[in-house]
Amino acid sequence: MQVKICGITRIEDALMAVEAGADALGLVFYKASPRAIDPQAAAAIAAAVSPFVTLTGLFVDAAQGEVDQVLESVPLNLLQFHGEEGARYCEQFRRPYIKALRMKEGLDVIAAMEAHPKSRGFLLDAYRPGVPGGTGETFDWDRVPQNSGRPIVLAGGLTAANVAGAIEAARPQSVDVSGGVEQGPGVKDPQKVAAFIRAAKSS
Ligand SMILES: O=C(O)c1ccccc1N[C@@H]1O[C@H](COP(=O)(O)O)[C@@H](O)[C@H]1O
């Protein structure tokens, strides 16, 4: 089980998460988020962590120029598009990307996946109207498709206490957490991070 710790804003949190076994770190380039980071701080984090850790840049319906500007200064390995971005938009950056799908009632998950043939995977997150992500809410894990043939990242309201059950129900390739391992907005709690990664990787 691979684990992404999202919403990293400080070098010490990045190093702590990697030391605890995180495979990927998420940097949120969405100004309205309490975990938003600017490119300069993100570049400093990138310079401090191992090149074998997947540095993921999260965007929400950003202007093309905004993404390009971040890419000029931050060596991101993966882009995460968490808004209503279409395939043509996502593919223009010529970087590996994952598309977030918010699990609104009635969403045809397979059709949404087929709309992004080049996406490296799909992050399934809870749906709350008006909030693009980081809600701290779960969704019905039984809705995660089992035969899509595409890599799935399970997200939304995960914690050390519920991640094992979530993995058992949804059978994802990887999990992603933000609020569930925080001690405050944008600040990670080392004990919660370690407990989360332990629980996920021993599932
Ligand atoms: O983290 C945020 O603030 C955020 C803002 C806008 C879009 C996505 C965001 N985070 C992503 O949402 C999932 C779930 O968050 P949580 O664990 O429920 O707090 C998180 O893994 C990020 O990928």
Image (cartoon, grey):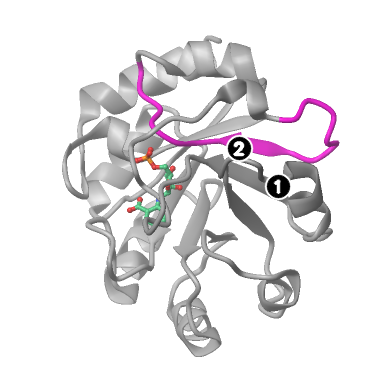
Magenta region, mostly helix, strand or loop? loop
69 shown above or below 156: below
Residue type, mark 1 in image:
Gly
Q: Earlier in the sequence, mark 1 or mark 2?
A: 1
Who is closer to the viewer here, 34 or 194? 34
Q: Magenta stretch: residue 179 in it?
A: no
Residue interval drawn in magenta: 145-160
Task: Give coordinates of residue 21: x percent, y percent.
Answer: 44, 28
Residue 172 visible: no
- The answer as to whether callout 1 falls within 8 Å of ligand 1 is no
Q: Position of residue 128 (x, y in %)?
A: 41, 47
Residue 98 vs residue 157: left or right? right
Q: Amino acid at mark 2?
A: Val
- Element type where label 2 sits in the image: strand
Q: What residue would you read off at disc 2?
A: 153
Residue position for label 1: 121
